[in-house]
Image: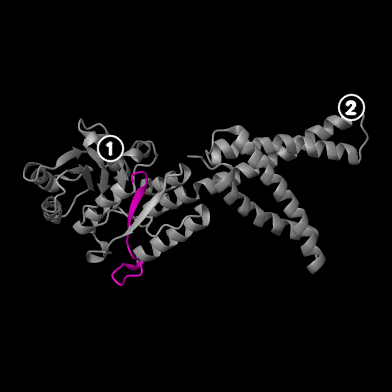
Amino acid sequence: MKTLIVIPALNPPEELIDYVERLRASGLEDILIVDDGSSKKFKHIFVELKEKYGCQLLTHAKNLGKGRALKNAFNYFLTMPDVKEYNGLVTADSDGQHRVEDVISMVKEIDKHPESLILGCRDFDSDNVPPKSKFGNKLTKAVFRIFYGRSIADTQTGLRGFPKRILKGMIDIPGERFEYETKMLIHTFEENISIAETTIETIYYDNNAETHFNPIKDALKIYKVIFGSFFKYLLSSLSSFIVDIGLFQIILWIALAIGINRGTIPIIVSTVLARIFSSYFNFTMNKNFVFNGEKSIRKTITKYYSLAAIQMGMSAALVAVIWHMLGGSETIIKIIVDTLLFFISYQIQRRWVFRKEK
């Protein structure tokens, strides 16, 4: 089957013409170029690619961002009259960082992994990697491992393979610029789409001068995406705490208003009723707002309350053990223990409680 090669381009170098010529000479003749609002002085490059080399061309009237360029290319591919003749597509950058041999390798990987997102991964320990690129990619890799439990060798690679089966869902992913590629990875985690990695040669020209990646603006967008679900988790937990305290106070006030004397019983009743409502509120928030996970309430609510019970038992046990071993303030120990369990619970909820089933 055939594979479409997609190259998004914004004010590309003249070398793009030579790159396309070499791709075609290697047998990769189906090439789609996305002109993402390039200025007029670069238009001759796109004209030559279309008229001389037979490339298909999508043109944006203005710069819409790499994310939008990719999504428009995906939509174009899926609506081609002869799409049944294709196994998928491969995206490559316009600055020549991706060798023709590596693009060919990615095409072969699509047949090997027809249901996986395929990443062409660079080696960031190479001597020719610019310091800012090496630091940025290693930091992002570490953050992904911590918050998503997945080790991705190259989170920002532009050389990616997309089997036809997974493409439709990629169009619905939000994001218009460089952050879209990060959201794409998170999407694969959430939808249980496997990721296949293949090593490619690490190439940087002129210290990566051709890149349109803004190291501050675009990096902030990317990390906002990565930390997004955790901040939602914090917000969900805080709002659930407020609901819990508010309901406790209301129920206790009602108990006293109807003539129940102050004491252990109204406190216990108020605590239990408030926790029942606040925990379900937290479950609903986490399911629909934080993780957007498995739709079956019966499956997830059983897992959620099982985790809550285990977490409560571990909290009590650990506080007691640590207090007996070290002494000190029980409250301070509980704060430390519960903070640790809070982070662990986030990972368990993401990977088990609200994980979508295939």
Is residue 126 located in the magenta-colored stretch of the structure? yes
Give the numbered dot on residue 258.
2
79 or 323, which is in the foreground?
Answer: 79
Where residue 96 appears, as percent x and y from the top left, is 20, 57
Residue 327 in view: no
* Local secondary structure at mark 2: loop
Residue at (35% x, 68% y) in the render: 131
Residue at (52% x, 46% y) in the render: 229
Is residue 203 located in the magenta-colored stretch of the structure? no
Q: Magenta region, mostly helix, strand or loop?
A: loop
Task: Give the answer, above or below, for where 9 lies relative to 142.
Answer: above
N-terminal of the pair, mark 2 or mark 1, is 1
Q: Which residue is mark 1?
A: 72
Q: What kind of residue is marked 2?
A: Ile
Where, quadrant-wise, is the N terminus in this rendering? top left
Where residue 346 appears, as percent x and y from the top left, is 59, 49
